[in-house]
Image (cartoon, rainbow, N blue to C red):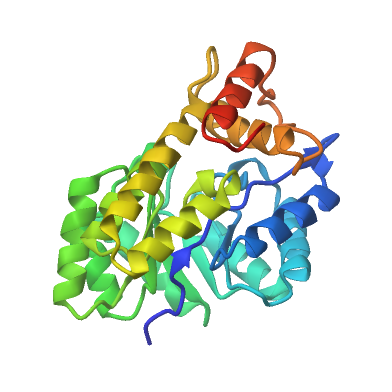
Amino acid sequence: MTSQIRGVIPPLAIPLKDGELDVASLERHINRLIAAGLHGLFVSGSTGEVAFSTTERRAQIQREVVRIVDGRVPLLVGVIDTETERVLDNIRAVEAVGGAAGVVATAPFYALGGETEIERHLRILAESTDLELWAYDIPVCVHTKLSPDLLLRLGRDGVLAGVKDSSGDDVSFRWLARANEAAGRPLRLLTGHEVVVDGAYMSGADGSVPGLANVDPEGYVRQWQAYERRDWEAVRTEQDRLADLMRIVQVKGVQGFGAGVGAFKTALHLLGVFDSSEMPRPVGALEGDNVEHVASVLRTVGLLS
């Protein structure tokens, strides 16, 4: 059966205070996202600090999210880990907490395998759970690109419910969308490429998973609504504004996770959603001119007065 998950499903940013989960800020953040009209949440993704979270922290986040959401939107939960047995443990932990519609897994990493091992890995995961299994294509982190042929084969066989594509490979995504359409759409396709969501929608995506939607959920919802009515000019116009907003990540002296998620958290702090812009150790929060840069971009796009 085709997954019912579609629309804007942001990867949930996680507020911290003194090294602990800031539950009050999390509740404020989730209620703000749902009020904006978002269609689901992706918990324990890259933006959600999955790589920085212990097993206990992952479970704590899931428990609090399930409590706060209270069934208002569906949840996808990341079970990302280095190899099959650890991912299976993560799936069992997600099932024990409950409240998830599906789990999201990358290719195995560290002890890298080939496509045969990746396919076997995903088939083993699917056989172990009744939850939907989503593939997370993020080669910048796991150093393996999931091929359209593999993903479509697993979709046709009922192994995968969908794909969260953060590969940045728009050609591959277009080919996957074309093949998925020709096969009767066995997969739900979501793009995590915040700045070119309009292109993914033109390719036939079923939604987006933009980290930037933590900062401006209304913008991505407006874009989705324009896509639903096939108002392509409105889709593009909204994307242009969101592309300008994405410049918050262009900070100085900070790279990768610290720049991207650091900018999102700084923006949420400036907007009064998070009580702190604290990052997980060993990553430092943005400071000084970088904070002013984020504030300046927020003012330019009209989010901060």
| Viewer-proximal residue among 72 and 65 | 72
| Percent position of residue 201, x then y | 29, 59
Judged left or right of residue 116, residue 226 is right
Answer yes or no: is residue 215 visible.
yes
Question: Eyeballing the image, is 243 above or below 186?
Answer: above
Image quadrant where residue 182 sits: bottom left
Name the residue furthest bottom: 1
Name above or below for residue 26 compared with residue 188: above
Q: Residue at x 35, y 69 (%)?
A: 228
- Residue at 33% from the left image edge and 70% from the top image edge: 229
Identify the image quadrant of residue 3. bottom left
Residue 67 in the image: state x and y as whole percent.
78, 69
Query: Can residue 120 be seen from the camera position used here?
Result: no
Residue at 83%, 42% (x, y): give it.
Answer: 20
In-front residue for pair 24/62: 24
Split into 4 quadrants, where in the image is the C terminus?
Answer: top right
Residue 162 in percent (x, y) is at 37, 69
- Placement of 170 over or under 291, stated as above or below: below
In the drawing, does residue 22 fall left or right of residue 136?
right
